[in-house]
Image (tube, helix red, strand yellow):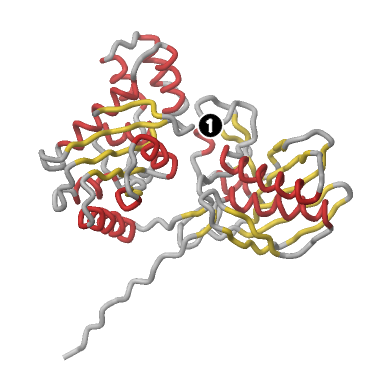
Amino acid sequence: MREETAEVATPLRSGYTTGACATATALAAARLLLTNDDSRAVRIQLPRGQRVDFDLVFCRRNGELAEAGTVKDAGDDPDVTHGATIYCRVALSPAGGVVFHAGPGVGTVTRPGLSLPVGEPAINPVPRQMIAGHLQQLAEACGYAGGFVVTVGVEDGEALALKTMNGRLGIVGGLSILGTTGIVRPFSCSAYIASIQQGIDVAYANGCRHIAASTGHASETAVRALYCLPEMALIEMGDFAGAVLKHLRRVPVPRLSLCGGFGKLSKLAAGHLDLHSRHSSIDLPQLAAWAAEIGADAGLQRAIAEANTTQHALQLAGQSRLALADAVCVRAQAFARQIVPAAVKVEILAIDRQGQLVGRAL
């Protein structure tokens, strides 16, 4: 008889965001300008407090400028930027603060509805905060009272951006510099779903009768601001809303607060359990139809159907004082209730790109 051996699953490896890479290289370049330190490694602190080291592929001075680069390691996540060289060029400025520019391979925002105004380089708010914070700390340590001009670039970024949704969103010329935690978690359906189920099991076994499932860091932060829940009651579900709702059939936690971005929750409202763009799409005409049901006139319906993003649609609805986010939450709640046991109380919370609560269904 042939002996069968069980396959041993190895943990998936996390990596770092483009925002974390840009922070490390900006710090290294500024450090070279202020201290002449051209070492090939740099340490930064991520938003949640972790301190991590980045190896540099170059750190050099070019006249009044300095530049440093690192190769992005996305871990086991199938990220288009894995292996790309992220770099920053830094110049000193007599003015205070930090000014950002898009270098080669980094896009520019050309349409409304994103977290940055039109015309700005596509360097998202948290990476900007990370870079500015590290440069300010360096300046204080060196007794430097001026500011910095930071140009972020990605080698071959314009070509890599063709594999993303950036063009459809109106980000032209390259990639976005992203990240809210600095860490890329590997995308694996089976592993991620297992971790969600285990999280719910542990919370219930330890007496938690109210859990909060969030799509990411910003939505978790919004839930934390509402409820004083223990850490184990906070479930990061990512895009796998279905994993949470279906598991509550087996572990009927009495109360669930499910929080996510307005766009992702519009997918749940439309009956999708996997909120990832690989498996479900945002339906702007459907949003327009829901807006009509709560009083949107024909012009607003048309504007929402033709909006650039769901955030743009949300802005348009807000300008007309139309509670579109609430309507989406109500629909998402009705769909969720079809899946969980009747005894489970489901609350849906929607946030915007700034992490502000914009919709709720109790």
Question: Where residue 12 sits: x, y (%)?
Answer: 41, 65
> From what the image shows, is residue 54 above or below residue 217?
below
Seen at 28% across and 59% down, the residue is 194
Give the class, few, some or many, for how many residues have Cα within 10 Å of label 1's Cα (few <14, many ≥20): some
Q: Quadrant of residue 220?
A: top left
**Nearer to me, 17 or 287:** 17
Task: Name the side, left or right, on which 249 lies relative to 36.
Answer: left
Question: Relative to residue 316, is residue 256 drawn left or right?
Answer: left
Check disc 1 and give the amino acid type: Ser
Q: Nearer the viewer, residue 106 or 217?
A: 217
Please say if 359 is above or below 237.
Answer: above
- The residue positioned 34% from the left and 8% from the top of the image is 297
Q: Front-most of 212 and 88?
A: 212
Which quadrant is the C terminus positioned in?
top left
Outermost residue on the left side: it is 342
Q: Relative to 255, is 55 above or below?
A: below
Task: List the residue tagged with mark 1.
Answer: 115
Q: Position of residue 254 (x, y in %)?
A: 17, 43
Q: Residue furthest right?
A: 63
On the picture, is 184 further left or further right than 104? left
The image quarter in which residue 59 lies: bottom right
Position of the N terminus, as image quadrant, is bottom left
Residue positioned 14% across, 53% down in the render:
250
- As drawn, is 246 to the left or to the right of 322? left
State the image coordinates of residue 52 (x, y, percent, origin top left).
58, 60
Give x and y (percent) for residue 60: 81, 57
Instruction: Describe the element under mark 1 as helix, strand or loop.
Output: loop
**What residue sits 50% from the left and 49% below the top?**
181
Q: Is residue 230 above or below residue 303?
A: below
